[in-house]
Amino acid sequence: MIEKVLTVTNKLGIHARPAGMIVDITGPAKSDVFIIFEGSRANAKSILNVMMLAIPMGSEVRFEVDGEDEQEVVQRLETLFHDNFNEEPG
């Protein structure tokens, strides 16, 4: 299992579009993927679960990725967060 902490740097935080982009990565993954924010743990393969966390800009989130493609999933999530979900940084 890999645990990775990432910081949300886009202005609007994780709203519907970024949540969908996370699910685009995690949904097809063979690994189990969870996102943890302020003590709440959600299945990162569910757009509703990710959106319900209401993660604002500047927040740190932790991903737990466990499975045969965990390295690839973490790398893709890191790239997504680094690129600010293709939005303007805050």
Image: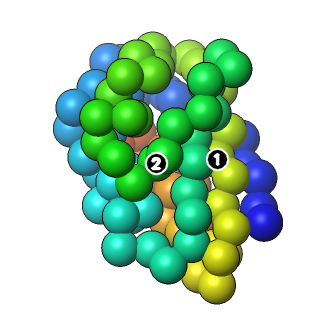
Q: Is residue 43 visible?
A: yes
Upstream in sequence: badge 1 or badge 2: 2
Q: Quadrant of residue 40?
A: top right
Q: Is residue 7 above or below residue 27?
A: above
Residue 90: quadrant of the picture:
top left
Q: Residues within 10 Å of mark 1 (few under 14, many from 20)?
A: many
Which x, y percent locates residue 14? 37, 28
**Residue at figure coordinates x 67%, y 39% from the top left:** 62
Type of amino acid under label 1: Phe
Horizontal side of residue 80 vs 61, given as left or right: left
Examine the rendered structure and indicate whether residue 65 appears above or below residue 17.
below
Q: Give coordinates of residue 23: x percent, y percent.
A: 34, 54
The residue carrying mark 1 is 63
Query: Please, which residue is most extreme toward the bottom here?
Result: 68
Q: Amino acid at mark 2?
A: Ala
Q: Name the element at disc 2.
A: loop
Place of residue 61 in the rendered image (x, y in percent of width and height, measured from the top left): 62, 32
